Amino acid sequence: MGWIKRLYNWVLSWADSPYAVPALFLIAFAESSFFPIPPDVLLIALCLSKPLQSYWYALVCTIGSVSGAAAGYVIGYAFWQAIGEYFFKYVPGFTHEVFNHVCQAYEANAYFIVFTAAFTPIPYKVITVTAGVSHISFIPFIVVSIFGRGLRFFLVGGLIRKFGAPVKVFIEKYFNLLTVLFVIIYVLAFYFLPKLIK
């Protein structure tokens, strides 16, 4: 897990950079198709630093994530036969078991699964790529992704903006613990995903 921790620290380091907003967009984009660290880590740090811009950060994060979801869908739809094995080999938690379970579950609950993964710590990249492989309808997929991702990121930004100091003090006090726990939950979700969608 050492490399996960290093990636986590690298993502967090962008919070103090003049390129923090583009980094937030790109990390949110990449996380929706292959990157293992959720963008919430950087989103929370930026919202804490400038609470009045929380909604702007949430919007950037949502647009980046949904754009990445579209890219993940295209990967699954058009390029899976060529590059699928690279996902199984190099993307953490992207196993044949998880992939097969998601594809089967799409037959009955496609958009519920997309929304649930978009809103919760369930690894979204598995859902976006398999959505393309399963050829579910693209426009509804994007609409559901916008609602799920937007609700998640605006909830984070809204809580920090609305409650201000108390939330800011609490998160600042426990920020490292909270973000590490979030990443751990996110990684563990890979292994519980097959059970959740049976």
Image (cartoon, grey):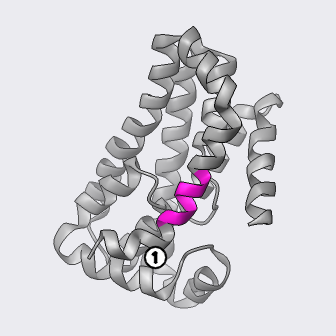
Residue 145: where, in percent of width, then height? 36, 50
Question: Image height check: is 54 above or below 2?
Answer: above
Residue tagged by mark 1?
A: 76
- Residue at horizontal 32%, vertical 62%? 138
- 10 Å crowding of disc 1: few (<14), some (14-19), many (20+): many
- On whether residue 20 falls in the magenta region, the answer is no
Q: Main secondary structure of the magenta part?
A: helix
- Residue at horizontal 74%, vertical 46%? 11
Q: Is residue 1 left or right of residue 167?
A: right
Q: Residue furthest left?
A: 108
- Residue at horizontal 50%, vertical 41%? 63
Residue 190: where, in percent of width, then height? 50, 69
- Where disc 1 sits, the SS reads helix
The answer, for residue 38, to whether it is visible in the render is no
Q: Is residue 14 left or right of residue 48?
A: right
Residue 119: where, in percent of width, then height? 38, 47
Position of the C terminus, as image quadrant, is bottom left
Q: Three-letter amino acid code at disc 1?
A: Gly
Residue closest to the eye, 92 or 134: 92
- On whether residue 185 falls in the magenta region, the answer is yes
Rendered image quadrant of residue 3: bottom right
Residue 5: where, in percent of width, then height? 76, 56
Rendered image quadrant of residue 104: bottom left
The answer, for residue 20, to whether it is visible in the render is yes
Position of the N terminus, as image quadrant, is bottom right
Q: What is the total number of numbered labels drawn onto the structure image?
A: 1
Residue closest to the eye, 158 or 188: 188
Question: Image height check: is 51 above or below 193?
Answer: above
Q: Which residues are magenta?
A: 183-189
